[in-house]
Image (cartoon, helix red, strand yellow):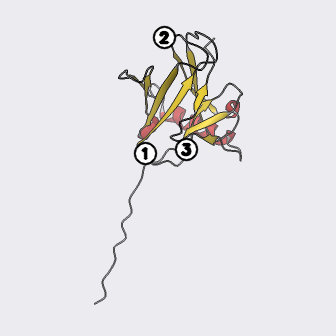
Amino acid sequence: MAEEKQQQTVAKNVSKHSLCLALPNGHCVAIIRKGTELPVKRTIKVTTTEVDQPNICLDIRLGENLMAEDNFAFSKIKLDNIPKGAAGAPVIRVTFKSYINSVYDLVIHYTEKDSGQTLTVFPSFGLSQDEIKAIHKKVQEKAKTIVPFDMGETQKIIPLGKSA
């Protein structure tokens, strides 16, 4: 008797769109790429562009495009109480944890020694299934052939301006 091999199908949860950070030059940098298996965790480092800058704005986008304006505006998060210092001196670590159903945790570390502040983003909170589908459709409609640069787990520090 020939041994029969059973093929097992495993359903994996993957990100439907890239989670990106808009940069001051208008481009986007991918933090979590479309198709990444979930759950996943990625850390980036951001810094100031001015002396004693009081805050930093994280402009988070969903999409596959190089230009921020061509991606879906997902959330803007203002980080206050940035430690005073020269432009580029305060380095803030931001860890993005992505789960299924587009739920994200952001863990923000203002210094190397602090335990971090956690913020959970629920993009579908208060939205109907039709509204969520419409958002995904908008992201797909804006999709172009150029994909944003992938940050991954890089040590590069991203300079960001203050919130208006």
The residue sitting at 55% across, 25% down in the picture is 46
Q: Counting residues from the N terminus, which is met first, the one under dot 1 or under dot 2?
A: 1
Q: Tell me the distance, in whole angstroms, between the alpha carbons under discs 3 and 1.
A: 11 Å
Identify the residue under disc 3: 33
**Quadrant of the image occupied by residue 9:** bottom left
User: The C terminus lies in which quarter of the figure?
Assistant: top right
Residue 12 position (above or below residue 161) = below
Where does the image place residue 78, in percent across and percent down from the top left? 53, 16
Position of residue 118 in the picture relative to residue 130 (left or right): left
Disc 2 is placed on an element classified as loop
Amino acid type indicated by mark 3: Arg
Where does the image place residue 120, in percent across and percent down from the top left? 41, 26
Frontmost residue, 94 versus 32: 94
The residue sitting at 31% across, 88% down in the picture is 2
Disc 1 is placed on an element classified as loop
Identify the residue under disc 1: 38
Q: For the residues carrying marks 1 and 2, which lies nearer the camera in this image?
A: 2
Amino acid type indicated by mark 2: Asn
Q: For the residues carrying marks 3 and 2, which lies nearer the camera in this image?
A: 2
Where does the image place residue 28, in percent across and percent down from the top left? 65, 34
Q: Label 2 neighbourhood size at 10 Å, few (<14), some (14-19), many (20+)? A: few
Instruction: Give residue 81's mark.
Output: 2
Confirm or deny contact between disc 3 and disc 2 (CB under 8 A): no
